Amino acid sequence: MKNIKLSIITPCLNSDKSIAYTLSSVYSQTYKNIEHIIIDGGSKDNTINILKNHKVKKKIILTKKSSIYEAINIGIKKATGDYISVLNT
C-alpha cells in the first residue's frame, strides 16, 4: 500500500495568540507523512517569530496583504501531497 502524503495548508495573519496551538495540533498527530504549509499574509505581530522558532518541520510562505482565499490557493499550488486539507488558526 502506498504511503499517502497529506498536505495541510494554514493561512494566517496576526495569529500570534493561536499559531503555536495550530502547529502543536498538526505535529501531535500519529500519522507522520504530513507536509505543513503556512502562508502568512503580512503579520505585524509576533506570528513570524513564533513560526521561525517553533521546532517542527514546515514550509513558511510570506506574502503581502493576501486574502485568506489567495493564501489557500498559494498553498494548493505549493502542495505536493496526495490529499490537501486546510487548517485555520
Image (cartoon, rainbow, N blue to C red):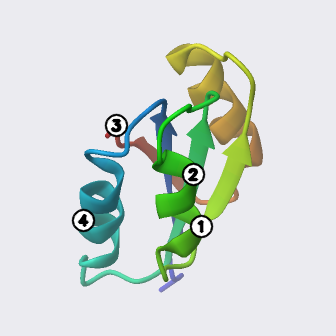
Cβ–Cβ below 8 Å for labels 1 and 2? yes
Mark 2: which amino acid? Ile
Q: Earlier in the sequence, mark 3 or mark 4?
A: 4
Secondary structure beneath label 2: helix
Q: Nearer the viewer, residue 27 or 30?
A: 27
Separation of marks 2 and 4 at Cα, in angstroms: 18 Å
Give me the disc on residue 48: 2
Give me the disc on residue 41: none
Separation of marks 3 and 1 at Cα, in angstroms: 18 Å
Give me the disc on residue 25: 4
Mark 2, other Cα within 10 Å: few <14 / some 14–19 / many ≥20: many
Give me the disc on residue 88: 3
Q: Is residue 66 left or right of residue 38?
A: right
Give residue 69's quadrant in the image: top right
Image x and y of residue 9, in percent: 51, 45
User: What residue lies at 26% left-to-right and 47% top-to-bottom?
Assistant: 18
Above or below, comparing residue 39 to residue 63 in the picture: below
Separation of marks 3 and 4 at Cα, in angstroms: 11 Å
User: What residue lies at 61% left-to-right and 60% top-to-bottom?
Assistant: 81
Secondary structure beneath label 3: loop
Q: Earlier in the sequence, mark 3 or mark 2?
A: 2
Q: Nearer the viewer, residue 17 or 55?
A: 17
User: What residue lies at 55% left-to-right and 59% top-to-bottom?
Assistant: 49
